Amino acid sequence: MKLPGKVKLVDVGPRDGLQNEKQPVPADVKVQLVHLLQDAGLKEIEVTSFVSPKWVPQMADNAQVMAAIRRQPGVRYSVLTPNMKGFEAAVEAKPDEIVVFGAASEAFSQRNINCSIAESIERFAPVVEAARAKGIHVRGAISTTVGCPYEGDIAPERVELVARLMKEIGVQHVGVADTIGVGTPRKVQRAMEAALKHYAVDDVSGHFHDTYGQALANTLASMEMGIWQFDTSIAGLGGCPYAKGATGNVATEDVVYMLHGLGIETGIDLDKLVDAGAYISGQLGRKPNSRAATAILNKRAG
Ligand code: HMG
Ligand code: MG
């Protein structure tokens, strides 16, 4: 098994994780979470999203959170921007990277961002152009690349199409997302292959929700293909309000434990990471949804 020598993790917990919480999470808790993540060695953090507060009230404090974070040199802070309105608000907050988010399934595109795939690309195009003109890196997220809550199985050709459309409008990197965590390693590899038809291996990442417990296996299967960048979520937080039943992203703690066991450098301090996960889980009144974090916390308790 040939694996990448280094792996970069993007912690999406403050955004993907907290967008799905029933109880509002105070802005200062979100800010503290970002601080703990960067203290643990995360070099990229997806902080928030500039979406409609009517659609996702949990992210309505986007500007407040971005203004309050203590930025650390070398850390990239990214935010989601679905359209020009979101982008214009986001620019004020000075993100290092913006994320446009589309889907390989028409039904999911409609439910999540209220437009077709073709319309989404039309909305993204001016956002991408404006971001690149300002020197802001542009990532594209492709949702439902293996399965959709409304359409079922998704063919790799659908992923390839969206990757091609994103490439054509100047999106610099694509994240292949298993939004509802139904993928298994070979299916995920086929979705990755589809994205790799239009993007270099250094410009593709994986974003795996762990609903069926396959996310670590899917991460490893992607690494076998040379993919070395992944979105993960502290304490396994996460979900999408428009993908009912989907649970959180693969826990950052679990992925770091696996990577360190494989001798792969991440720059992340697992103990500090576990502290960050324990902090946010405590704020949410539950235990971290991470096997590695649970084991480490149990060991600490002796
Ligand atoms: P829309 O209703 O079609 O937008 O929503 P519109 O352009 O028709 O505007 C309607 C109203 O929304 C107007 O206000 C706009 O000003 C306002 P009104 O005149 O009625 O008072 N509006 C906005 N307000 C704030 N920020 C904006 C914005 N845009 C319009 N950016 C829209 C379209 C995309 C905005 C909406 O569908 C939306 O906000 N969707 C967000 C969905 C979302 O955040 N989903 C979760 C993130 S994606 C995800 O989790 C998947 C991912 O993790 C990968 C994976 O796992 O698959 C990334
Ligand atoms: Mg997600």
Image (cartoon, rainbow, N blue to C red):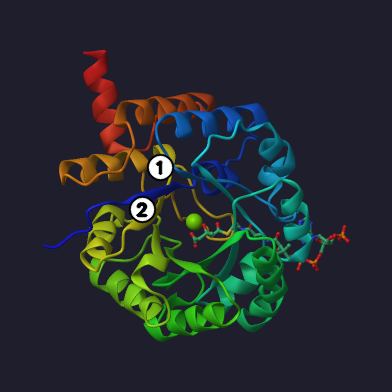
Q: Nearer the viewer, residue 90 or 50?
A: 90
Q: How many marks?
A: 2
Q: Amino acid at mark 2?
A: Asp
Q: Residues within 10 Å of mark 1 (few under 14, many from 20)?
A: many
Q: Residue at x 61, y 30 (%)?
A: 70
Q: Residue at x 48, y 77 (%)?
A: 151
Location of residue 120 in the rendering, given as x and y in whole percent from the top left corner: 66, 76
Residue furthest to the left in view is: 1
Visible in this render: residue 53? no
Query: For the residue with label 2, is its CB less than 8 Å from the closest atom of ligand 2?
Result: no
Location of residue 130 in the rendering, given as x and y in whole percent from the top left corner: 72, 67
Q: Residues within 10 Å of mark 2 (few under 14, many from 20)?
A: many
Question: Could you tell whether 268 is left or right of 97 in the image?
Answer: left
Residues at discs 1 and 2 in contact (Cβ within 8 Å): yes
Q: Residue at x 44, y 64 (%)?
A: 177
Location of residue 156 in the rendering, given as x and y in whole percent from the top left corner: 38, 82
Q: Amino acid at mark 1?
A: Gly
Q: Nearer the viewer, residue 133 or 231?
A: 133
Q: Which residue is mark 1?
A: 236
Q: Earlier in the sequence, mark 1 or mark 2?
A: 2
Q: Which residue is mark 2?
A: 210
Q: Residue at x 74, y 58 (%)?
A: 86
